[in-house]
Image: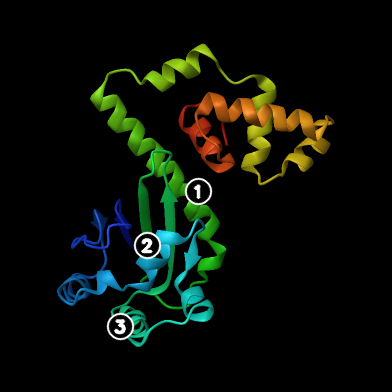
Amino acid sequence: MYSSVSNDIENHHNKTPCLARNYPEDWMKHYVENGYIQIDPVRRRGCYSAEPFTWQSLKDQFKLSKKQAIIMSMAEEAGLHDGIGIPYRTQNGETIGVGMASSVKGVNPEEHIGKLYMLTSHFHFMYQLLLEKERIKTSEHIIDIALTPLTTREQDVLLWCMHGKSNWDIAMILNVSEHCIDFHMRNIFKKLNTNSRLTAVVKAIGLGLIKP
């Protein structure tokens, strides 16, 4: 599996396309020298998409320019097969892009894209947590969590969110009203400082508040 991580995919003048990668060196050298970063359809799509996407979907759903089609074809020839792009936006407005491709043909990225998106969110949260712990010995947000821990019901709600259940589904499972679940979700978002169900689940797991 090849992968590339960039924390500035919105900066089109950035000459370095990633912070960490294991894409083939020959391909990356050719990519940078020819300025592909400016027109790369994967990178451009990552700037505007809120959802993960497959490289194949770019070919199927969008009219690529001749140069963009060439880039995709050359990436395939370089050994990057069945790729996906995962844009991730943080609460402070930072945009991160994760690109992954298989080193062998025949992989169906649609089967794995949800799990990879979850892992990306978890990785970013833990990475930021480590940076915060390094900067100051105790994370202020963790102190807030300790002062206002999740209730047992809130933990139950998050666990069902982790299994992909909607608020209506959770209400039926817990035998309460959907309004009650909405109330719990608002409290969870406030305590975990997020407005995303996925991020709330990832943060709760990372902080040991729920166990998958």
Q: According to the image, label 1 marks what residue?
A: 118
Residue at image position (27%, 63%) is 12
The one of 103 and 177 positioned closer to us in this rendering:
177
Secondary structure at badge 3 equals: helix
Question: Tag 3: residue type?
Answer: Met
Whether residue 210 is visible, yes or no, is no
Question: Tag 2: residue type?
Answer: Gly
The one of 77 and 48 positioned closer to us in this rendering:
48
Secondary structure at badge 1 equals: helix
Q: According to the image, label 3 marks what residue?
A: 74
Q: Earlier in the sequence, mark 3 or mark 2?
A: 3
- In the depicted structure, whether residue 137 falls above or below residue 45: above
Task: Please report contact status of discs 1 and 3: CB closer than 8 Å, yes or no.
Answer: no
Cα distance between the residues tagged 1 and 3: 29 Å
The one of 10 and 20 positioned closer to us in this rendering:
10
Q: Earlier in the sequence, mark 1 or mark 2?
A: 2
Q: According to the image, label 2 marks what residue?
A: 99
The image quadrant where one finds the N terminus is: bottom left
> Residue 95 at x, y = what percent?
37, 50
Q: Is residue 103 left or right of residue 152?
A: left
Residue at image position (35%, 87%) is 66
Residue at image position (35%, 31%) is 129
Cα distance between the residues tagged 1 and 2: 14 Å
